Image (tube, rainbow, N blue to C red):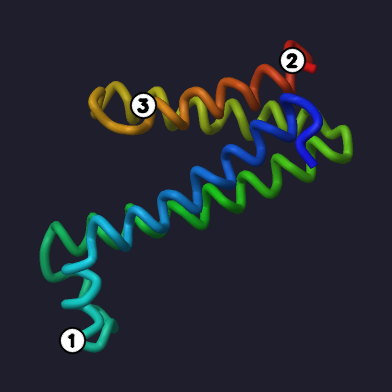
Amino acid sequence: MINNWKTAAAWALIALGFLHIVMGFVRFKQPFLAALHEGIFDTFKVDDTRRLAFWFTLLGPALVLCGHLALRAAQTGNFETLGLIGLYLLVVAVLGIVAFPASPLWALLVVAGLLFAAGRGWLT
């Protein structure tokens, strides 16, 4: 149940992770189909598009995991861990935005900022 900023931000991170997975398979349908057709094993090193498809999509489960950890931290009152998750994701988002300003990493910046602020007790 979403009852405050802490759990709302955690659920947003989980949603962002699932969105990454779905968008990875939609956006990179052809590279995934080609790799599947070739037998998957060791087929993602063929070209940059396949490597991008793999790593972009694989980031999704990592975001979902971070979201679940943040949700557990929020629900158990472990706000130090919640803030730490937010801090790490803030660093990743800022570095990503500096490297690729036109990327969707702005969404991660917002969610990470909320997690960090909630973990610090700035949001209740």
**Quadrant assignment for the C terminus:** top right
Which residue in the structure is indicated by mark 1? 38
Of the numbered discs in the image, which one, if any, rests on residue 123? 2
* Residue 98 coordinates in the image, percent (x, y): 29, 21
Q: CA distance from mark 3 to mark 1?
A: 35 Å
Closer mark to the observer between disc 2 and disc 1: 2
Rendered residue at 69%/26% (across/down): 83
Rendered residue at 47%/31% (across/down): 108
Amino acid type of disc 3? Leu
Amino acid type of disc 2? Leu
Q: In this rendered view, identify the residue nearer to me: 29 or 74.
A: 29
Side of 42 relative to 63 (left or right): left
Q: CA distance from mark 2 to mark 3?
A: 24 Å
Which element carries disc 1, helix, strand or loop? Answer: loop
Badge 3: residue crowd in 10 Å (few <14, some 14–19, many ≥20) = few
Q: Earlier in the sequence, mark 2 or mark 1?
A: 1
Which residue in the structure is indicated by mark 3? 95
Closer mark to the observer between disc 3 and disc 1: 1
Badge 2: residue crowd in 10 Å (few <14, some 14–19, many ≥20) = few
* Residue 24 coordinates in the image, percent (x, y): 32, 57
Above or below, 92 relative to 29: above
